Amino acid sequence: MALQKNDFIEIEFTGKIKDGEVFDSNIPEELNKLNPNKNAKPFVFPLGQDMFLKGIEQYLMGKEVGSYEIELSPKDAFGFRDPALIQMIPMRVFIEHKINPVPGAVLTFDNRFGKVLTVSGGRVMIDFNGPLAGKDVVYTVKVSRKVEDINEKIKALIEFLFRRELKYEIQDKKVILNVDKGFKNFAELFKDKFKEILDLELEVHELESPNKEKEDK
């Protein structure tokens, strides 16, 4: 059966610059080359929710379980390079922060990554474009299966949205999510996502701190 929006799928993938090097993968052999400290595992996510590269998701909708090679232009991948993001910064800024800029170095400015292009005449030229901006890329994607189990879907959605495992239970048409103190308001921001993707209401319960439980006892 053809894959539709909000279908959960499990994939293995590798992304590389066209005629170039691999930049992302969840296959052990490839990921080990990129980051030996990161564990490789299949990725489970719902289609059409921008949880993977949008161009890939659009390509897979209407397809069957199987393997695909997908070539994407910058428009459908990581965007075009923007000349306005190449900026000149006075050397004194780097001196004040005790940073020695050298061509090729990648530095952080106001939570933005920038690559040093040139250093001359008391000025440093920085490129704030993403490293994949303007690149044609190729993904090999293996859709291993369509995920049907509701618990696996919920766990995958929780992991993607909150970047952690959270305890939950299902009651009728509702997911009851248990979160640490102070996390409730943030978790409740995703009520609409749970409804749209899983057709389940989200109810968030805040756990008491261990110290509070001892006091109650």
Image (cartoon, grey):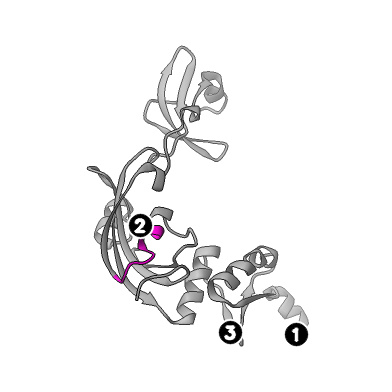
Q: Is residue 80 magenta?
A: no
**Mark 3 in CB contact with mark 2 (< 8 angstroms):** no
Going by the picture, which residue comes out furthest to the top? 121
Q: Residue 77: in sight, yes or no?
A: no
- 155 shown above or below 14: below
Q: What residue is disc 2 on? A: 37
The image quadrant that residue 43 belongs to is: bottom left
The image quadrant that residue 125 belongs to is: top left
Residue closest to the eye, 214 or 52: 52
The Cα atoms of the two marked residues, 3 and 1, are separated by 29 Å
The Cα atoms of the two marked residues, 3 and 2, are separated by 35 Å
Instruction: Please name the residue shown 36% across and 70% down the image.
Output: 10
Q: Residues within 10 Å of mark 2 (few under 14, many from 20)?
A: few
As helix, strand or loop, the secondary structure at mark 1 comes to loop
**Mark 3 in CB contact with mark 1 (< 8 angstroms):** no
Q: What residue is disc 3 on? A: 170
Mark 3 vs mark 2, foreground winner is 3
Going by the picture, which residue comes out furthest to the right? 216
Q: Which mark is residue 149?
A: none
Q: How crowded is mark 1: few (under 14 residues within 10 Å), some or many (20 or more)?
A: few
Q: Residue 50: in sight, yes or no?
A: yes
Residue 16 % position (x, y): 28, 48
As helix, strand or loop, the secondary structure at mark 3 comes to strand
Amino acid type indicated by mark 2: Asn
Tell me where the magenta segment starts and ends, as one range.
Answer: 56-65
Q: What residue is disc 1 on? A: 217
Residue 136 % position (x, y): 31, 42
